Amino acid sequence: MKRLLAVVLALMVFTVPAVFAEEAKPDLPDASQDKQVVIIYGGVTSASMGEMEEMWIKMVEELSGGSIKIEHHPDNELADDRTAIELTAFGDMGIGSSSTSPLATMYADFNVFDAPYLFSTPEQAWAALDGPVGTSIYEGIEELGLKGLMWCENGFRNLTTKDKLVKSPSDLSNMKLRTMENKLQMAAWSALGANPTPMAFAELFTAMQQGTVVGQENPLGIIDANSFMDVQGYVMMTRHIYTPYVVLMNLEMYNNELSDAQRAVIDYVSDYCEKWQRTRSQEIEGEILKKFEENKINVIRLTPEELAAFKQKLIDDKIYDQVKAAMIHPEYIDMLLAANQ
Ligand code: TK8
């Protein structure tokens, strides 16, 4: 009897998401008899996103009574960020995930997140994502055949270099840095004096290893999950930009292939997991910082004055005007700058 109980408990822990152990199942319509739908879900390379994706999948499969099945492709294994979203718009993939910056050529208001020093806390960024800015982007991308499911966190980005300590823009002089494939991010690094080299994320590790670029910039979660510090010597906590992850679904599939009950499950689970991932991302960042410091990795914290020098240089180069000129709703920039003083 005891052994049976142990087996049952072990199975429960394994198959039931932690969330249902703590709280009652949500009151959702029964989707178990609905026509089965299989969704191909392309995920990204970040520890908190990977954990979130697994939880999202378990919850959707369970709460839909098995009528939704997910085919998960984690870690960009099917496609890089922008390609994943293109495939999702075409319907070759059901759900794709991406940092916002490589999507700016598809929908110009994604550029709002390429304005440096627009947010100074994650809460400020979350307020923008959950407020009119995030909502209006979700509305706009429906024309591309995309349905917004989740605004998740990639996070504040920090500069890493192989062997160069960077404390002021002059330390960046002509430095070859990989940037995302985004005009405004390239413009910002040029304004700071660096030599930006855009490339897809998948090529980055080798580029650093072979010395094609001296450095790159990414949130701690990505730096750690991809072992960048094996080929980089310094992390400067520049926190120059906050880029979200956006998780999008093929709109036609969302509207026409799912039943009302299945849509209710997807909406509920996405809301739940979006909040969960943001908190988890923060926890993981704290753990990584501790681990880096214990392992004597050079983590350089810049003083407020040092950070202000980077920001000033970008303002002198009229970076906010450049961002606004690239947007459909330029007023969002002034709105967020005013809100986040
Ligand atoms: C990983 C990317 C990555 C992004 C980049 O799929 O390209 O530097 O920050 O996180 O989304």
Image: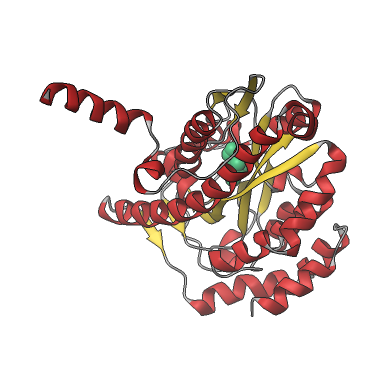
Q: Between residue 115 and residue 78, name the one nearer to us.
A: 78
Q: Which residue is drawn at 81% across and 50% down?
A: 139
Picture residue at 66% right of the left edge, 59% below the top: 129
Specify the quarter for ligand 1: top right
Counting from the top left corner in percent of width and height, residue 241 is at: 61, 60
Q: In this view, does 45 lie to the left or right of 291?
A: right
Please tell me whether residue 4 is drawn above or below residue 85 in the rendered image.
above
Which residue, as the protein is rendered here, is positioned at the far left?
2
Q: For this rendering, which residue is in front, 119 or 57?
A: 57
The residue at the point 53 percent across, 30 percent down is 75
Position above or below: 270 against 192? above
Above or below for 255 versus 190: above
Residue 331 visible (yes or no)? yes
Image position, residue 181 (x, y; %): 72, 43
Q: Say if residue 217 shows up in the picture.
A: no
160 sits left or right of 332 in the view: left
Q: Image quadrant of residue 79?
A: top right
Labels in figure, total: 0
**Closer to the camera in the image, 317 or 240:** 240
Q: Where is residue 61 in the image (x, y as percent from the top left)?
A: 52, 28
Q: Quadrant of the C terminus?
A: bottom right
Q: In the figure, residue 132 lies in which quadrant?
A: bottom right
The image shows residue 234 at horizontal and vertical percentages of 43, 53
From this view, report whether residue 295 is shown above or below residue 210. Answer: below
Q: In which quarter of the image is the N terminus?
A: top left
Left or right of 13, for residue 39 = right
201 vs 14, nearest the viewer:
14
- Indicate how the structure is coloured in the image: secondary structure
Residue at point 70% right, 48% down? Answer: 101
